[in-house]
């Protein structure tokens, strides 16, 4: 089972959850089928699974690969480090969603749309935990 998430880095919350797709499906194909819309001028940090996904009026950043038989320039290395420092926040949100073991483990329930509901509840619980965590700090 596979879903795509759009995450707000500042609030560390899940802002969008795609449908659940069964089997092996590429991340970019999910993006193309879901037809995401982003506000003009926003910034999108993506990993290599979304190569070729370039929404209109959106600045996208993706780590650069090392060219064959060459090294990355110091500038490219610094940019990759900046991108990875932001991407780690995304990975932390994903792990917060997967804290619910029903999302992480194999789901043996075969009811229609049940896997979507489970993922939606897990994302809602993560957002709830995050909201409580940051409201207690204020």
Image (cartoon, rainbow, N blue to C red):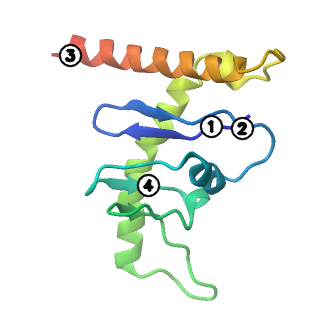
Residue farthest bottom in this picture = 69
Residue 102 horizontal side relative to residue 92, left or right? right
Quadrant position of the N terminus in the picture: top right
Tell me residue 128's x, y (percent): 39, 14
Mark 3 or mark 4, which has the lower sequence index? Answer: 4
Tell me residue 47's x, y (percent): 53, 56
Mark 3 or mark 2, which has the lower sequence index? Answer: 2
Instruction: Give the residue pinned by disc 1.
Output: 3
Mark 4 burial class by Cα count in 10 Å: few <14, some 14-19, many 20+: some
Q: Are marks 4 and 1 in contact (CB under 8 Å)?
A: no
Instruction: Give the residue pinned by disc 2.
Output: 21
Mark 4 or mark 1, which has the lower sequence index? Answer: 1
Instruction: Give the residue pinned by disc 3.
Output: 137
Mark carried by residue 37: none
Mark carried by residue 84: 4
Secondary structure category for the residue under label 1: loop
Q: Are marks 2 and 1 in contact (CB under 8 Å)?
A: yes
Closer to the eye: label 3 or 2: 2
Residue 39 horizontal side relative to residue 92, left or right? left
Q: Compared to 62, does 109 lie above or below? A: above
């Amino acid at each position: 089972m596979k879903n795509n998430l759009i995450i707000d880095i500042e609030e560390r919350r899940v802002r969008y959850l795609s449908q659940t797709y069964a089997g092996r499906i590429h991340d970019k194909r999910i993006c193309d089928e879901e037809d995401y819309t982003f506000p003009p001028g926003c910034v999108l940090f993506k990993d290599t699974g979304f190569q070729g996904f370039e929404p209109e009026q959106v600045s996208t950043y993706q780590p650069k690969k090392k060219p064959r038989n060459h090294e990355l320039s110091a500038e490219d290395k610094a940019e990759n480090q900046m991108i990875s420092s932001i991407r780690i926040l995304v990975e932390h949100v994903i792990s917060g969603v997967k804290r619910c073991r029903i999302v992480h483990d194999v789901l043996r329930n075969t009811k229609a749309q049940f896997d979507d509901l489970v993922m939606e509840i897990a994302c809602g619980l993560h957002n709830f935990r995050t909201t409580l965590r940051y409201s207690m700090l204020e």
